[in-house]
Amino acid sequence: MPLAYVATYVVVIGPVELWQLVVRPRIVELLRNTVTLAAACMAATAVLGVALAFLVERTDLPGRRAWHGLLVAPLAVPAFVNGYAWVSLDRSVHGFAGAFGVVTLSYYPLVYLPVVAMLRRLDPALEESAWSLGHSRARTFRTVLLPQLRPALLGGALLVGLHLLAEFGALSLLRFPTFTTAIYDQYGSTFNGAAATAVAGVLVLLCLVLLLADLRLRGDRRYARVGRGAARNVVPLALGPWRAPALAAVGAVVALAVGVPAFSLVRWLAIGTSTQFPVAELTEALVATVVLALAGAVVTTLAAIPVVWLAVRHRGRLSTLIERSTYVANALPGIVVGLALVVASLRLVPVVYQTATLLVAAYAILFLPRAVVTVRAGLEQAPVVLDEVAQSLGVGPLATARRVTLPLIAPSLGAGAALVFLAISTELTATLMLSPIGTRTLATEFWSASSELRYGAAAPYALLLVLVSIPATVLLMRTDSPAAQTEQVPA
């Protein structure tokens, strides 16, 4: 629906006006900003995520369990709350440098978590074989380990890129203009729907470029194996003289990604002149946020299962097209998706307009890729031969899925639901546009206060956003634990 909305509007505009709207110096500047920031942050989060995951999982870094929890913690701090924390402490944090730093610190866990989960499931015998053949640690990492991490690495980097294409709150606070901020400016200030839709069309094209690049890099390799070789403990690499620099690097990441936002929130709660604690309003916003996030997480994760099943178990052009199509709307700003659903609901099913049903549908459209990427990483490593053995014993397809496949991918389902819950609890624009009258969430109340520079008033809502995100973050940590990753197939 969002894609049809944009395409229909583009056709209505006409080629002449569309060309005039697109080939403007401002569009060139926005294109440069968007592409540069997306490419830089995807590369930075990929390098940071893999490096941190390797340090935590494959070396003798002291306190690895504690560091893992702290490195996942940024998921509990929404990107726009992180931007608010930095901007409210230092107004010089803005532009490309500020946006690059804040977004990288906010999104690197999207790469770190799936890479950690895959490292814990890989068979160390392959690396040991390479060492026995005389390969160095560096060459083994490059030729043996890194190729096996490809699904997790590419999936995480793709999520980072798509989120950046649609990111509004953090980039608006950091005053770095991209296509998304321009779309909001057009709709919000000048009500220029034609210009905003033309820019949204460019965003769709950028999304397609990302999807094609991911498809090309992913290839058609299979990564599943039979057996439990990955459950064997890996002998950690001794860091030796590099232990102190490694500890300093990991500590610096945690301090910047978690310490600064925590300090900023505590500071504004203590000294903010506008700080208030309206218990009734806070409770109402908290309940609405949790209920909507839970409903959206369940619906979105259930919707991801058949998509991933087709993409992995029945590979082909049609299944690939279905899977890739789920990513398109994720690159569009929430306001475009919201407008598409408003138009569609009013014309087709007016009874759902301004209901929670329509809002949950918007959440599913916006955040389905989070569930698809995570569930696919789990299904990729679930051996298809186990399904074939079950069916050869007379077990039907549905029973095989329930008794064999779903238990294997249960950790991935939990991780996908947790990621979607985190995204929904911090979603802003679609919630503002589609929520039933009188519904207020923590994100909308926080944005209302912070956009008016009432940092003290915004702090309680930001703190509750972080607290609401903690259970989902803990669930993500548990779903990639060794116990959760152990392959067990019920009899």
Image (cartoon, rainbow, N blue to C red):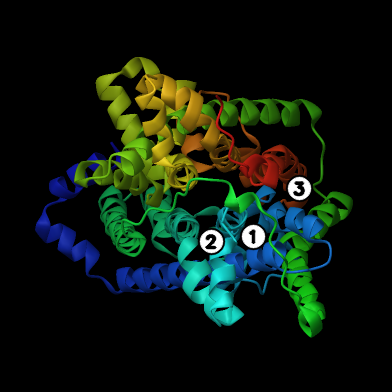
**Can residue 452 be spotted in the picture?**
no
Q: State the image coordinates of residue 403 (x, y, percent, origin top left).
A: 50, 24
Task: Decide which of 130, 213 is in the foreground and name it.
Answer: 130
Left or right position of 465 against 144: right
Q: State the image coordinates of residue 384 (x, y, percent, origin top left).
A: 39, 39
Q: State the image coordinates of residue 250 (x, y, percent, origin top left).
A: 74, 69
Mark 2: secondary structure: helix
Mark 3: secondary structure: helix
Q: State the image coordinates of residue 291 (x, y, percent, origin top left).
A: 61, 25
Pick out the residue farthest to the right. Answer: 270
Residue in the image at 43% along x and 58% along y? 158
Residue 171 image label? 2
- Distance (Cα) linking label 3 and label 1: 13 Å
Quadrant in which the C terminus appears:
top right
Residue in the image at 59% along x and 28% along y? 294
Residue 83 image label? 1
Q: Are marks 2 and 1 in contact (CB under 8 Å)?
A: yes
- Distance (Cα) linking label 2 and label 3: 19 Å
Mark 1: secondary structure: helix
Q: Name the residue that disc number 3 marks.
A: 459
Residue in the image at 84% along x and 49% along y? 269
Task: Decide which of 129, 181 is in the foreground and name it.
Answer: 129
- Distance (Cα) linking label 2 and label 1: 8 Å
Quadrant in which the N terminus appears:
top left
Pick out the residue farthest to the top. Answer: 351
The kind of residue tagged 3 is Ala
Left or right position of 155 against 85: left
Residue 489 lies, with reference to residue 30, above or below; the image says: above
- Say which label, 2 or 1, has the lower sequence index: 1
- Say which label, 2 or 3, has the lower sequence index: 2
